[in-house]
Image (spheres, rainbow, N blue to C red):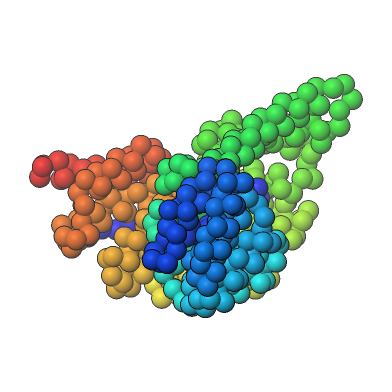
Amino acid sequence: MRAPPLLARRGVALAVLLAALAVPRLAVAEMRRDLAAEACRAAGAGEHDRALALSQEVVDGAPDDALAWRVRGFVLSQATRTSEALEAYDHSLALDPQSAVAANNAGAMLLKLDRVEEALARFEDALRMDPQYADARNNRGAALERLGRTVEAVDDYREALANDPRHARARSNLGAVAWRRGKLRAAANAFRQAASFDPRFQGAQMNLALLREAVADEDAHLAASEQAAAVPGATAEVKARPLVARAGRLARDGELEPARDLYLQALALTPRDAALLNNLAVVEDQLGLDREALLHLGEALTLDGALLVARNNVGIVHVHRGELDIAESAFRDLLRDAPRFHRAHYNLGVLLAARGQAEASLASFREANRLAPWDAEAAYNLAMMRRRLGGDILSERRGYEHALQLDDNLAEAHLALGMLLADPATPNGLRDPVRARTHLTRFLQMARPTDEDGRMQAEGWLHWLSARR
């Protein structure tokens, strides 16, 4: 039987949202189709004066036709005459109140005018008329995000992609969320994918360029920090900054010993830096130095008892020591004080699964996923646990695929999906040996050298698949 690994990770303490605008479909016999089509073409090409003249001729020739006014609205929107475009779409809606496209496009204009609550209402109208309308679903997500309702927005972006798997704007918007959450690789993957879905969509290219600038800014910031630290008379805090920055980079790249050395050098300069103590402890835990990790986490919490990530990491270290009762108490105590700290829900789910408490584990993963739908590890473990409790294979496969959509570098999800696609027990409509090889090979490229069990499983399945070619 397949046994996807439970995933437990340590924790260490924009972009452009563009509303999709539907281009009018010229399907009414009474319209002067040639003029309408040429107006839309000219608007898309930036020939705004010509497009405006043609679209005016269209509505003059069919003043009671809803599609004519949608054409006019589209042309006005391309000319950035947003208020007039809104009036045209409203006129179209008055003539055809059941037009989901006109409602969506009116909402897009309202969003551009920063009338966000009104825009949200229009998108909801469009979705009542057509629940599968991906543009309106994505646009409602953009409005919700502007209102600070990010969790609901992410749900809408996902739903838009479920309805249209190549919806470039929804994919780009998920990338923007990932970026704001510090998931730079997932963000870059999303922006690249969005650009491949629609090469004309400049928003994804712009976001990717901004992300690259941010990484370049990080390099520039590090160089500036090192220059400042070299100035005679620099304070201890100034001298510590480049050490901490370099240590963080090394830790992200898996170079844990040199990362620890730099953190210790920084700590000698700033021994009362709670965040630094926490990050040092994370590296020490990964190196198997659990006693040192707990010591430094204790010091961090003595300095700053409100450092939630350190409290969470205390629980993780105790899990690695096999002290599950102490770890569970740490996670539950943290959640009593901070019930929206999603990684504590996640880690509690891992612990409960290890104890065989599957239903309770599922509830914890579900809450972690609800609070942080951008977290690929939570999405992966939620899919895996649902399957263990009797869920269907299609949902399991979609769960792993969704986790990889959030973070294509999640090695465990590649392994789990590869095994599912290879397994002869998987129904024929869902089994895919070719894709299985791709994901199993990707896992082997990414897996840690210490992950002997995972490597053995991946190599075993690849050997089995090769023997049956």
Left or right for 304, reference 213: right
In the image, 283 versus 38, the foreground residue is 38
In the image, 317 versus 421, the foreground residue is 421
Q: Residue at x 39, y 56 (%)?
A: 165
Q: Give residue 177's position: percent from left, percent from top.
A: 58, 54
Q: Residue at x 38, y 41 (%)?
A: 447
Q: Is residue 456 visible?
A: no
Most extreme residue toward the left, as rendered? 468
Most extreme residue toward the front, as rendered? 61
Up/down of 404 relative to 452, above or below: below
Where residue 445 sits, quadrant-wise, is top left
Q: Residue at x 63, y 35 (%)?
A: 213
- Image quarter where the C terminus lies is top left
- Image quarter where the N terminus lies is bottom left
Up/down of 10 relative to 442, above or below: below
Q: Give residue 334's position: percent from left, percent from top.
A: 64, 67
In the image, 39 versus 171, the foreground residue is 39
Q: Residue at x 50, y 76 (%)?
A: 96
Q: Is residue 68 visible?
A: yes
